Image: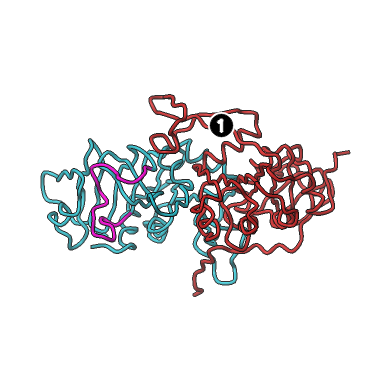
């Protein structure tokens, strides 16, 4: 039998998360974020968190909820617009912010999960991102050394998952979730639909269950849209 | 003088059959509205889709389907979704043939600044640094001057850089320019714009062609 990773809910899934820990949180904007677990982090009241996430949510949703309670000490992200409270805390010095090129952020998470301690990338060479970093030419082009990222807990959101922790994501809600799942000491996956073993086609699984320690079916997904853009019919 | 749609229209002429293209936020997004007839291109958005389609009809929005600007979109037949590491493997690995993005400043050596203004809230570079560091074919879409009327085509960027020596072409409301040999080479004038006006609005080194400067045909 496959090893069961199932826990009852967000409370059980987030057990052990303490103040001062480093967390990875999947999502791009508000798309594919672990809504249930974020609410549980608010309930836990843990503080001094270092959060690795591509964005920082909006004022009243996503990671913005943790910012409201001043639970985050440091954000590691690629883009942090759309959040007034974030801006206020950043400008007042309450919040430390490390901005990283998006591709480097993704690869640093992937590397962390894949046992690659560092890699060279051209992104950021000649800019302030490259300052103080080891530089080396490959094929006549300068690159900078970027190191892997790992986390005490990686918290991801998938569309479907089975009891073994295998995950399938939907559309662009996949984004950073698969790499972060690989890079957590403990990876928590919340899914819209938790299915029995054998229901997911092994050919179609995006994240193998070996990367997931705890899985639960979330409830009440809001799935807020940040920029609703439409065209008119006809 | 072109408006934003005019700039997008002109850049669309750079699309070639079989190109995979990454369009940045703002004017670049509009390029998708002017794909020349008879060619097939696919749009990549770095949050994880290839084969991005137009905005959905009202009521068809899917919160799980957005572009890198966090706008609701649709997927074309043959589209594919992938994670962020794979997305930037496409970009870093030079599998994307054309990148179009906006800029605050471009320098005559191809440097670009588009992510940070000192003293103002810094939102971050998003995927821009990865895109400009790796793409071979980068076109900047922007206004020729800023809101204060100052040239955005400079001898050297004054703002913090996004990438060095990477921009190959600039299409503005006034002109099409190629960047090579440490200068802006004027290729075309926008309709109704004179060479003198372009010279006056270009702070960086501007090289004029031997003969007449053709007007863009849009």
Q: Is residue B158 magenta?
A: yes
Q: Which structural element holds mark 1?
A: strand
Q: Is residue A209 above or below residue B192?
A: above
The quadrant of the picture occupied by the N terminus of chain B is bottom left
Residue at 70% x, 51% y: name it.
Answer: A158
Q: Spot the cyan chain and give its letter.
A: B
Relative to residue B176, is residue B33 depicted above or below?
below
Q: Residue at x 49, y 73 (%)?
A: A232
Q: Name which residue lies at 61% across and 33% down.
A: A111
Q: Please report, as a chain letter, where disc 1 is located.
A: A
Q: Residue furthest bottom?
A: A234
**Image hue for chain A:** red
In the rendered structure, the answer to whether residue A125 lies left or right of residue A226 reads: left
Which residue matches tag 1?
A: A147
* Dominant secondary structure of the residues highlighted in magenta in the image: loop
Query: Over which residues does the magenta segment extend?
Result: B142-161
């Amino acid at each position: 039998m496959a090893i069961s990773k199932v826990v009852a809910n967000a409370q059980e899934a987030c057990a052990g998360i303490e103040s001062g820990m480093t967390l990875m949180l999947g999502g791009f904007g508000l798309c594919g974020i672990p809504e249930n677990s974020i609410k549980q982090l608010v309930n836990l009241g843990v503080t001094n968190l270092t959060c690795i996430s591509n964005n920082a949510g909006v004022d009243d949703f996503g990671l913005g909820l943790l910012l409201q309670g001043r639970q985050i000490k440091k954000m590691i992200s690629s883009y942090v617009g759309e959040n007034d409270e974030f801006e206020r805390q950043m400008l007042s010095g309450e919040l430390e912010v490390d901005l990283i090129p998006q591709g480097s952020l993704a690869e640093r998470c992937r590397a962390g999960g894949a046992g690659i301690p560092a890699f060279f990338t051209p992104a950021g060479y000649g800019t302030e991102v490259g300052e103080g970093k080891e530089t080396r030419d490959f094929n006549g082009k300068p690159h900078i050394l970027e190191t892997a990222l790992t986390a005490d807990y990686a918290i991801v959101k998938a569309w479907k998952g089975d009891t073994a922790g295998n995950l399938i994501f939907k559309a662009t809600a996949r984004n950073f979730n698969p790499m972060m799942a690989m890079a957590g000491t403990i990876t928590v996956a919340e899914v819209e639909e938790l299915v029995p073993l054998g229901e997911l086609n092994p050919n179609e699984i995006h994240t193998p269950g070996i990367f997931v320690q705890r899985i639960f079916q979330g409830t009440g997904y809001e799935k807020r849209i940040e920029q609703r853009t439409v065209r008119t019919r006809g | 003088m072109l408006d934003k749609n005019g700039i997008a229209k002109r850049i669309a002429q750079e699309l070639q059959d079989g190109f995979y293209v990454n369009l940045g936020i703002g004017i670049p997004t509009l390029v998708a509205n002017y794909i020349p007839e008879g060619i097939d291109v696919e749009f990549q958005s770095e949050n994880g889709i290839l084969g991005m389609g137009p905005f959905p009809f009202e009521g068809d929005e899917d919160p799980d389907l957005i572009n890198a600007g966090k706008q609701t979109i649709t997927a074309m037949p043959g589209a594919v979704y992938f994670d962020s590491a794979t997305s930037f493997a496409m970009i870093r690995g030079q599998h994307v043939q054309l990148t179009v993005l906006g800029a605050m400043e471009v320098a005559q050596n191809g440097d670009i600044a588009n992510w940070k203004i000192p003293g103002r809230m810094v939102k971050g570079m998003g995927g821009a640094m990865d895109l400009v560091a790796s793409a071979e074919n980068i076109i900047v879409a922007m206004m020729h001057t800023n809101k204060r009327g100052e040239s955005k085509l400079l001898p050297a960027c004054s703002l913090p850089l996004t990438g060095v020596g990477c921009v190959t072409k600039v299409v503005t409301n006034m002109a099409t320019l190629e960047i090579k040999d440490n200068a802006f080479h004027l290729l075309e004038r926008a309709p109704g714009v004179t060479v003198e006006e372009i010279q006056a609005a270009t702070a960086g080194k501007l090289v004029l062609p031997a003969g007449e400067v053709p007007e863009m045909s849009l």
